[in-house]
Image (cartoon, rainbow, N blue to C red):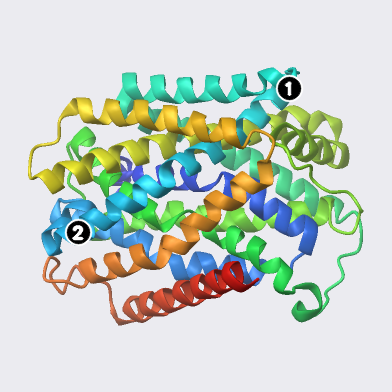
Amino acid sequence: MKFNVFLKTLGPGILFASTAIGVSHLVQSTRAGAEYGFALVGFILAANLFKWPFFEFGSRYAAATGRSLIDGYQMISPWYSRLYLLINLLSMFFVNAAVTFVAAGFLQNLFNIELAPTLYYIPSLILLMFSFAFLALGRYSLLDTGIKIIGSFMLISTLLAFFIALFKGPQKPIVYEPLSAMIGLESLPFIIALMGWMPSAIDSSTWNSLWTMERSRQSGYLPTVKESVFEFNMGFWTSALLSLCFVVLGAYLLYGTGNSLPDNNVGFASGVVNLYAAQLGSWTFLIIAAAGFTIMLGTCIGVMDGYARSTARVIAVMQGKAEKPAAYLWWLVLITLGGFLVLSLFMQAFNQLVSLATTISFLIAPVIALLNYRLVFSEHLSKADQPGPAMRLLSLAGIGFLGLFSLVMLYYLWWG
């Protein structure tokens, strides 16, 4: 691919990566390394691999048809778009609240903000309002530019911390125990939560199709399927690589030390940043603190845009009418208010909020996976634009993987 063509295509993959590298990586992957060493790496790799086709389908479908996955759902069956709307409504407020709550902790840590318990909601409210204003004023253009800057800083700072940790080595010897000796039934909720947003929730695949279309309108260039898929895969596998970096950081700096990460957003942020700085050198404090905050800020903005954009679109296609520009703004308002309401209910339950949001995402993942598979292997795409046999087999395996673990989790919730 020519470099000038790549620059015109570049955007949706970075947006995806920035949105993905948030709670799943900074919180869940770090906690996985801290509590289990490298025992859960296989689950992280499996989640990335088996979810990959369904995210890739978003870019592929948009480039091949000029439509979003959401439009495709409606074209196959109105019940598909209704189901997608229901999934959005069930998850949007919890997901938005979870990423904002985590980001607020890193904001307070970065600027050393101490608040009375009655004022803990203020940083979250500030971030919600900032994300709202950022998107309401700038729409996709500002989002695209801002995320590229945030993403670049995030990548550099994370890799710097990772290589410093590798150079210094683990704080305690990492014992390679058999998986069965480390993981029992009581670990299942965390494993499900870990995979729920690893690297992101599958319903965000529709966001990528919408971002692909928006980037094409912004740049004035219509990329080929191959170009769009390449750009997306670059962002996807970068996020997958970074998930392993955070596992290593958690394992090297926490596993076996007897230290644990607190169950509140400020405490967690402070614990991660201070621990990393203490072990990697005090000079790294601002690097780690700024990296954590920028990671979560990018996630907050991307999540709010994705939910507002996708919900406005699905309602428009269900009504068979042109999408009104004001609809996006109205959904931004509603998501901001709903996210703050959820935050007010979970202000003292950091882990519970994160686990609830990620578990919801994992339980609905098989449904979205089936919808995307049905759509991409339909008559909407020519044989040349459809994935090859290997990707088809991988996507079927992914549906089975997601379905199996969802059933196991439902069994655990019901009988556990």
Look at 14% across and 63% down and name the residue there: 77
Q: Residue furthest front?
A: 415
**Sequence order check, earlier mark of 1 and 2:** 2
- Dot 2 alpha-carbon crowd within 10 angstroms: few under 14, some 14 to 19, many 20 or more: many
In front of the other: 392 or 328: 328
Q: Is residue 48 above or below residue 107?
A: below
Please say if 178 is above or below 119.
Answer: below
Which type of secondary structure does the marked residue at label 2 adopt?
helix
Residue that mark 2 sits on? 73
Q: Is residue 58 among the parts visible in the rendering?
A: yes
Left or right: 413 in relation to 236: right
The residue at 77%/35% (across/down) is: 267
The residue tagged 1 is: 117
- Judge by depth and name the residue closer to the eye, 222 or 52: 52
Residue in front for this viewpoint, 193 or 290: 193
Residue at position x 49%, y 69% in the image: 49
Which amino acid type is shown beneath numbered disc 2? Answer: Tyr
Q: Residues within 10 Å of mark 1 (few under 14, many from 20)?
A: few
Looking at the rendered structure, which numbered label has been put on residue 181? none
Residue nearest the observer in this picture, 353 or 294: 353
Q: Is residue 1 visible?
A: no
Residue 29 placed where, x, y %? 66, 54
Residue 117 x %, y %: 73, 22
Q: Looking at numbered disc 1 in the image, what kind of residue is underneath it? A: Pro
At which x and y percent is residue 129? 46, 20
